[in-house]
Image: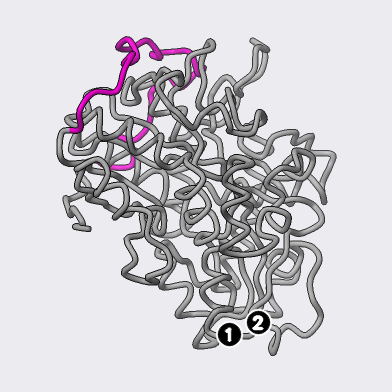
């Protein structure tokens, strides 16, 4: 599998939709393809690291090669560092599709970068769990703009040799951060502001936060103030998962926010790392495979989307990354790879996901129908994060 490398062509400001005042704005686009034709021989993807494995890291996990052999579509990938970076890469026009989280999907739809899809063309869509279909972050006015890849929570991880009492809340990185000054691991993205807001939902209910992504000015300012207190404890910020793995493995960090993917890899190397979903809940993701509205290889992209919902590919991908599979057939296939995987990841437990706030795009209209509400925009989030990080 080859890796495309192109410069990030747009500044943070260029990532943003000036309006982003509702999911429906700018959502009109081409008519969905009614039938998948012959593959064009190539497929260029923007992915979260680990979403397109070809057996190079572990020979037991390869869902790219079977796809290439079956379709003739050669897969090329570029890893994104966060959703802002992923949107910027899509704006370049060099890619056929993306594995987008909810804080990118709304922007991609509203800007016309994402193509609508006809789910009837996919053999594997019917089997997808009902609570993963027609979600607000990838569906507008009944029109689908992608298909699910998997979902997962952001976890609190710690070194059991350094943090001897297993934490049950996010308190150790916030109020207790001074105890781990210089050794806290934090995701380097503006979306992390939502993690501060989520903690304030539990600890400062008088702020009235009901959605950690849709914040009025007072709520946003309180979240940023909490982040400034965290920053004073000199955390190590990560955007590349390999950097975080190295920091945990070396002991440079002992506690912080992470993905199940890193936990799996660290534990596979016998690192003394445990992780939990804290009691006040967490942010997380429900990722969507989306096609670029002017994709050069649309048939290959649609084939890939269907492939990633197949039992074999979805089982491998979600076991590998440590996230929930998207269908019962995928859960059955995952059982052979990792017994109990779907149970441990709550794949078919809708109630579990009520405590996970999927990444979402901050919107001026607060993503609701109340004309009297105004929220801080995505641009403001990026500006605040840039200021916090001194970038």
Is 8 on the left-hand or right-hand side of 266? left
At which x and y percent is residue 12? Answer: 33, 42
The image shows a total of numbered marks equal to 2
Q: Residue at x 48, y 14 (%)?
A: 143
At which x and y percent is residue 236? Answer: 50, 72
- Give the quadrant of residue 260: bottom right
Closer to us: 115 or 378: 115
Q: Are marks 2 and 1 in contact (CB under 8 Å)?
A: yes
In the rendered image, which residue does mark 2 sit on? Answer: 159
At which x and y percent is residue 203? Answer: 82, 51
Task: Determine which of the numbered discs, if any, sits on residue 188 in the image.
Answer: none
In the rendered image, which residue does mark 1 sit on? Answer: 271
State the separation of the CA atoms marked 2 and 1.
Answer: 8 Å
Query: Against 140, is 43 above or below?
Result: below
Q: Can you see residue 320?
A: yes
16 is within the stretch colored magenta: yes
Majority secondary structure in the magenta region: loop
**Magenta residue span:** 10-39
Q: Which quadrant does the C terminus fall into?
A: bottom left
Q: Residue at x 48, y 39 (%)?
A: 309
Is 260 on the left-hand or right-hand side of 188? right
Q: Of the two numbered discs 2 and 1 on the same chain, state the one appearing first in sequence.
A: 2
Closer to us: 171 or 217: 171
233 is within the stretch colored magenta: no
Closer to us: 309 or 215: 309
Q: Residues within 10 Å of mark 1 (few under 14, many from 20)?
A: some
- Foreground disc of the pair 2, 1: 1
């Amino acid at each position: 599998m080859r890796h495309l490398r192109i410069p990030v062509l747009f500044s943070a400001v260029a990532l943003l939709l000036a309006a982003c005042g509702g999911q429906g704005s700018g959502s009109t686009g081409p008519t969905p393809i009614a039938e998948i034709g012959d593959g064009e021989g190539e497929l260029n993807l923007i992915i979260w690291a680990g979403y397109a494995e070809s057996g190079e890291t572990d020979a037991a996990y390869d869902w790219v090669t079977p796809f290439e052999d079956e379709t003739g579509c050669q897969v090329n990938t570029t890893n994104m560092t966060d959703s802002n970076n992923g949107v910027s890469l899509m704006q370049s026009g060099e890619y056929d599709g993306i594995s987008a989280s909810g804080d990118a999907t709304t922007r991609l739809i509203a800007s016309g970068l994402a193509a609508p899809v006809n789910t009837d063309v996919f053999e594997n869509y019917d089997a997808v769990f009902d609570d993963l279909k027609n979600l607000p972050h990838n569906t507008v006015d009944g029109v689908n703009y992608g298909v699910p890849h998997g979902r997962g929570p952001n976890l609190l991880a710690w070194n059991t040799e350094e943090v001897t009492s297993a934490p049950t809340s996010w308190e150790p990185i916030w109020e207790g951060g001074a105890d781990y000054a210089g050794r806290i691991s934090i995701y380097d993205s503006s979306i992390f502001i939502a993690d501060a807001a989520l903690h304030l939902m539990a600890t400062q209910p008088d702020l009235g936060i009901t959605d950690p992504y849709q914040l009025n000015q007072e709520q946003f300012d309180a979240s940023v103030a909490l982040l400034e207190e965290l920053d004073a404890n000199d955390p190590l910020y990560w955007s590349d998962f390999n950097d975080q793995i190295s920091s945990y493995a070396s002991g440079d960090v002992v506690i912080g926010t992470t993905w199940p993917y890193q936990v799996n890899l660290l534990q596979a190397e016998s690192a003394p790392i445990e992780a939990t979903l804290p009691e006040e809940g967490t942010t997380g993701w429900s990722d969507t495979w989306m096609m670029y509205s002017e994709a050069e290889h649309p048939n290959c992209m649609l084939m890939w989307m269907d492939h990633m919902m197949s039992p074999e590919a979805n089982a491998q991908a979600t076991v590998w990354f440590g996230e929930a599979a998207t269908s019962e057939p995928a859960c059955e296939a995952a059982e052979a790879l990792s017994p109990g995987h779907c149970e441990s990841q709550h794949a078919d437990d809708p109630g579990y996901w009520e405590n996970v706030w999927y990444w979402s795009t901050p919107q001026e209209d607060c993503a609701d129908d109340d004309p009297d509400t105004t929220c801080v925009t995505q641009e403001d989030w990026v500006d605040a994060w840039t200021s916090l990080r001194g970038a």
